Image (cartoon, helix red, strand yellow):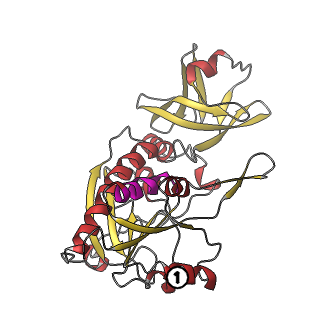
């Protein structure tokens, strides 16, 4: 078996997955079909449909595409079987039923944006940063019955800098992951795969989950220490974005916060107090310091730097965030 004869079905949806599909296509691997999510309604009235990033790239490359609503639908399963794939690769898609992942003779492997067994779940990049990790990585593993628990094929680690946000880490792992996908396929073709059970790596380790993030998950808790709030904000930036309520007198407005700087100088006001200094500084008091807000978005407005925000912002009463 060679990369030209090994028949691969690729499954994925967002930009993160496109990089891996692109590496396979441009690397001369035999991608016989692509599975992605159905087109999504977009626009104010939800009357237009938008194709996923993976679908757009696949069509540009002349690859056949399936977009099942239900992965157990017999019509989809028949179409998938007709591709007669030797191997399936999943990158940022959805949980597959056994009837799908067990279909090809070489199995199905997944690319996960964390160093498994840490950060199993839907949002591994966000939670690694939120928890203040200084290292994360990328893992390929064979799918089995439970989500993100299969035998590990390969892992590659990267450092997370103190200024990286979720987008920064996403982009690094996207490129690294594409390379690892191709390397994993090469190892499978060469029959050089030696897998490791996640239980072996999890021994004597406290595992951190990475559950799906919802709107309420993103609300900032200003009672936490400065470093914890700083990590929380960058772990959700730029999407879905941490948010708070800006309170001025009896008026409340939702405020999204995208970037901050830590300041551990002493505070003498309650946590959550907002202090404006001139037209360039907006800072929030915490229990052990301040966070200087650098990029933000007030409800109904566009995202802007703090200096632009302050030029058009006037407050005649005490400000706080909650």
Q: Nearer the viewer, residue 229 or 33?
A: 33
Q: Quadrant of residue 198?
A: bottom left
Q: Magenta residues?
A: 14-25
Q: Quadrant of the N terminus?
A: bottom left
At a point 60% along the width and 29% down the height, the residue shown is 274
Q: Nearer the viewer, residue 43 or 138?
A: 43
Q: Is residue 127 visible?
A: no
User: Is 20 covered by the magenta stretch?
Assistant: yes
User: Measured along the vertical axis of the image, is residue 58 above or below residue 70?
Assistant: above
Percent position (x, y) of residue 245? 68, 39
Q: Quadrant of the C terminus?
A: top right
User: Measured along the vertical axis of the image, is residue 121 above or below residue 198?
Assistant: above
For disc 1, the marked residue is 97
User: Measured along the vertical axis of the image, is residue 303 above or below residue 39?
Assistant: above
At a point 57% along the width and 44% down the height, the residue shown is 241
Q: Nearer the viewer, residue 202 or 251?
A: 202
Percent position (x, y) of residue 262? 42, 33
Which residue is the extreme one toward the top? 278
Q: What secondary structure is marked by label 1? A: loop
Percent position (x, y) of residue 130? 45, 51
């Amino acid at each position: 078996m060679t990369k030209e004869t090994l028949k691969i079905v690729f499954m994925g949806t967002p930009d993160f997955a496109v990089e891996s599909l692109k590496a396979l296509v441009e690397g001369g691997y035999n991608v016989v079909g692509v599975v992605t999510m159905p087109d999504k309604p977009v626009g104010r009235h939800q009357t237009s449909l938008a194709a996923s990033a993976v679908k757009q790239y696949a069509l540009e490359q002349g690859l056949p595409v399936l977009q099942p609503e239900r992965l157990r639908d017999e019509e989809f399963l028949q179409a998938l079987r007709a591709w007669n794939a030797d191997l399936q690769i999943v990158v940022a898609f959805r949980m597959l039923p056994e009837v799908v992942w067990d279909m090809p003779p070489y199995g199905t492997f997944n690319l996960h944006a964390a160093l498994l067994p840490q950060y199993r779940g839907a949002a591994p990049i966000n939670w690694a940063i939120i928890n203040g990790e200084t290292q994360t990585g990328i893992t390929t593993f064979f799918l089995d019955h439970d989500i993100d628990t299969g035998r590990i094929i390969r892992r590659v680690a990267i450092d997370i800098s103190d200024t990286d946000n979720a987008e920064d880490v996403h982009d690094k792992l996207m490129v690294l992951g594409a390379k690892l996908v191709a390397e994993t396929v090469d190892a499978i073709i060469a029959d050089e795969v030696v897998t490791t059970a996640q239980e072996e790596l999890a021994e004597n380790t406290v595992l951190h989950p990475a559950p799906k993030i919802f709107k309420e998950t993103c609300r900032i808790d200003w009672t936490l220490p400065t470093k914890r709030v700083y990590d929380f904000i960058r772990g959700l930036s730029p999407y879905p974005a941490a948010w708070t309520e800006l309170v001025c007198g009896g008026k409340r407005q939702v405020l999204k916060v995208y970037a901050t700087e830590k300041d551990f100088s002493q505070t003498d006001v309650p946590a959550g107090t907002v202090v404006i200094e001139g037209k360039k500084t907006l800072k929030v008091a915490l229990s052990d310091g301040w966070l200087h807000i650098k990029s933000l978005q007030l409800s109904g407005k566009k995202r802007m730097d703090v200096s632009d925000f302050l030029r058009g912002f006037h407050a005649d009463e005490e400000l706080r965030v909650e």
